[in-house]
Amino acid sequence: AQSVTQLGSHVSVSEGALVLLRCNYSSSVPPYLFWYVQYPNQGLQLLLKYTSAATLVKGINGFEAEFKKSETSFHLTKPSAHMSDAAEYFCAVTSEDDKIIFGKGTRLHILP
Amino acid sequence: AAGVIQSPRHLIKEKRETATLKCYPIPRHDTVYWYQQGPGQDPQFLISFYEKMQSDKGSIPDRFSAQQFSDYHSELNMSSLELGDSALYFCASSPSFSTQYFGPGTRLLVL
């Protein structure tokens, strides 16, 4: 069965600093992996997705994630945090029957 | 670009009442998914439809039912509402089990 673990329910970084949100997955089949962002009082927006093409995936708003099979990881990074990046971030994996399984989410706080 | 549309965006009901949430998928998307996100929780899969047929069922209570219509829109019907049903309900659509795109959600408050 597929599952996703996000390390850290809250992460705080200073504006301009590196953002690193950690995600590890478990999957019995080659996974499709996603990062979604949820801004306050809004819906889920797709940031980026890995579908077995390039292991380094670039998404919107300067975010990227690297699929590392040996580490079963799909960590999300951004070189320089912006105040507008403050949101909840969900790592997700597609199950064998194509529904999305979400991690518990990581709330990103940006410090001025 | 067209996105997933959900209506209503906000809904307030009392216990034991009935609610109907609607989802209009992105044009040419034939698959619809429903998720429930409780306060401070991650979204949980409820049910999905492909080509108007139920394709999978998750943690959906027996009090809830859903269907997909000939124009591919979907409705989630919730009866005998309980306080614990208060949540954000997301609909997502995809073209044949590909990447899911989410709607803005319907926030349901049960008093």
Image: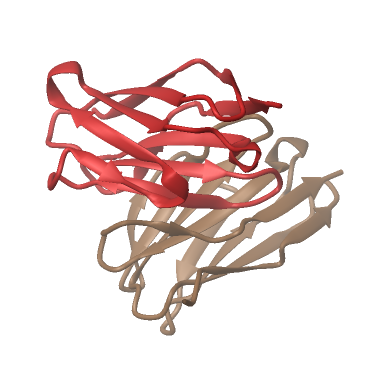
Q: Position of residue A4 (x, y in %)?
A: 35, 26
Q: Nearer the viewer, residue A41 or B13?
A: A41
Residue A103 found in image quarter: top left
Along the line of sight, the residue nearer the viewer: A24 or B108: A24
**Where's the N terminus of chain A, which quadrant?**
top left
Q: Position of residue A37 (x, y in %)?
A: 51, 43
Q: Is residue B102 left or right of residue B94?
A: right
Q: Position of residue A32 (x, y in %)?
A: 23, 42
Quadrant holding the C terminus of chain A: top right
Image vertical order of residue B63 relative to residue B37, above or below: below
Q: Residue at x 58, y 39 (%)?
A: A85
Q: Is residue B34 among the parts visible in the rendering?
A: yes
Residue B61 visible? The answer is: no
**Residue visible at 37% across and 57% down in the picture:** B100
Name the residue at 36% across, 49% down.
A59
- Horizontal placement of A57 versus B48: left or right? left
Tell me the red chain: A
Q: Based on the displayed image, in which of its 4 quarters is residue B72 positioned?
A: bottom left
> What kind of colouring is applied to the model shown?
by chain
Task: Count the marks.
Answer: 0
Q: Residue at x 38, y 31 (%)?
A: A76
Q: Quadrant of residue A70?
A: top left
In this view, the residue farthest toward the bottom is B71
Q: Which chain is brown?
A: B
**Front in this rendered view, residue A57 or B26:** A57
